[in-house]
Image (cartoon, coloured by chain):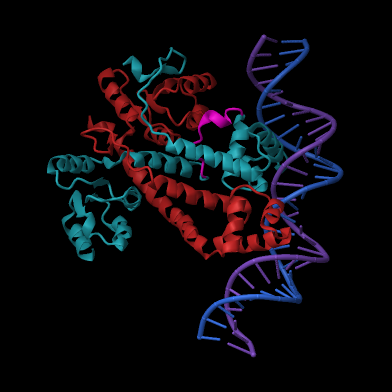
Chain colours: A cyan, B red, C purple, D blue
DNA sequence: GGAACCAGTGTACTTTAGTACATGATTATG
DNA sequence: CATAATCATGTACTAAAGTACACTGGTTCC
């Protein structure tokens, strides 16, 4: 791995292909320290989703499993060279999740509207924070309101969602999140949309 | 925006196109609350990189700048529908950067998962019940011990797992559940050429 | 036979959480 | 204009949750 890094630094290739089988566990972490100008693609047949996620986090730009098919491999390499990512589909969802989570600096999970549409905006904000494990005091400070007000909102939230305390609220939120994780993203049935202010069209109109 | 949300919730389209010009500043945040089953594509000519980044963080799956060219727009919509992202190239780098930044934090909670094994049998039982939303009194009754003892065990658990209260304990446990959930349903098969890969494209490549 | 660990309990105390009842301001909607 | 909804806050109170310090009894292991 050290030799590889030295070589990469000297040649500065646009893309480097690494065989997953020849990769040690510790090497994964080291990947991120390879030159930022070089994109890394891992090839190998048996990369698990978890491993691919780890690799992605370590700075790998693509994972290609069918190492026999050089035809597509070329396509992958060129895509990665052009700044794109080549990852398994399920990781795209994770990427977005992770991004949304770091956005609000709390773990602002994307929760499906189903259970929570009864909440007002304020109630929702506070509920999410509770779901993140924040205390009333902290929430109050973060929202610029009194702890008393936080409690007031929470009492409403408990009522609306049918729970007795903040822990069970958190469980509802995380259950909801899990539910949306399980959903397969491709249902072929699409409804027809009418024109509506900011809503322009769905792709059925194309 | 409220009307849009209501409509989206009812129809559950796979993809929704929103005109950037008709989007208010506050709406950006609200986007994340739209159903997770619906992918959002923003179209409009003058979306800045910063704004596109914000939109992405808010859950938008694609931004398309040339709103006149419906030919490529269709391509974009279909790509997003299939689970891909359509963002400008520079954002791909940001995505990777952001991901690397959060790695350390994730490692922290993985570590805490490893510490789960440090719990004694009794501590583990009680921790699980807490993660289930039960109160100390209930747990005490269920285990045939005093509420005081439950508290004693919990204090130990908090110490060992590095959390401050029962809610954060519950979060650690649910994180564990989620981790094992993600592993099982491995890669839904989609198409021939796709091979379960998701290409995150940059729209400058067209 | 201690040392180390686990389980259980007691008293006492501090801090959060949550509820009840009430008030005021703002905004939207019919 | 009136009514409703949302947001905010106050006082007061009850009930949990959590910590501190101390103590007993049972394994297990060197």
Residue C6 lies, in percent from the top left, at: 60, 69
Point out the residue furthest to the left here. A71
Please indicate whether residue D28 sits to the left or right of residue C9 in the image: left
Residue B168 visible (yes or no): no
Please indicate whether residue A126 sits to the left or right of residue B27 in the image: right
Comparing A201 with B37, the one in front is B37
Q: Residue at x 47, y 22 (%)?
A: B8
Q: Residue at x 48, y 37 (%)?
A: A179
Q: Is residue B141 magenta?
A: no
Name the quadrant containing residue B155: bottom right
Prevailing secondary structure of the magenta residues = loop
> Where is D19 relative to B78, above or below?
below
Q: Residue at x 53, y 52 (%)?
A: B173
Residue B44 lies, in percent from the top left, at: 37, 23
First to last magenta residue range: A107-118
Name the quadrant containing residue A95: top left
Residue B163 lies, in percent from the top left, at: 58, 57
Label total for image: 0
Please indicate whether residue B108 sits to the left or right of residue B161 in the image: left
> Where is B87 relative to B117, above or below?
above
Q: Residue at x 50, y 39 (%)?
A: A177
Residue B104 visible (yes or no): yes
Comparing A115 with A38, the one in front is A115
Name the quadrant containing residue B201: top left
> Where is B112 relative to A112, above or below?
below
Classify the position of the C terminus of chain B by image quarter. top left
Q: Is residue A109 magenta?
A: yes
Residue A20 lies, in percent from the top left, at: 23, 55
């Amino acid at each position: 791995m050290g030799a590889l890094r030295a070589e990469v630094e000297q040649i500065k290739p646009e893309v480097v292909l690494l065989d997953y089988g020849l990769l040690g566990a510790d090497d994964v972490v080291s990947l991120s320290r390879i030159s930022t100008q070089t994109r890394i693609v891992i090839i190998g047949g048996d990369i698990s989703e978890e491993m691919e996620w780890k690799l992605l986090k370590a700075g790998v730009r693509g994972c290609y499993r069918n190492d026999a098919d050089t035809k597509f491999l070329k396509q992958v390499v060129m895509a990665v060279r052009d700044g794109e990512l080549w990852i398994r589909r399920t990781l795209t969802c994770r990427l977005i999740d992770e991004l949304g989570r770091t956005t609000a600096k709390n773990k602002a999970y994307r929760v499906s509207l189903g259970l929570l549409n009864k909440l007002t905006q304020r109630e929702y904000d506070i509920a999410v924070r509770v779901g993140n494990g924040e205390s009333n005091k902290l929430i109050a400070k973060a929202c610029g309101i009194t702890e008393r007000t936080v409690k007031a909102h929470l009492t409403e939230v408990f009522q609306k969602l049918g729970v007795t305390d903040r822990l069970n609220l958190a469980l509802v939120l995380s259950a909801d999140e899990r539910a949306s994780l399980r959903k397969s993203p491709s249902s072929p049935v699409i409804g027809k949309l009418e024109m509506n202010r900011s809503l322009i069209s769905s792709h059925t109109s194309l």
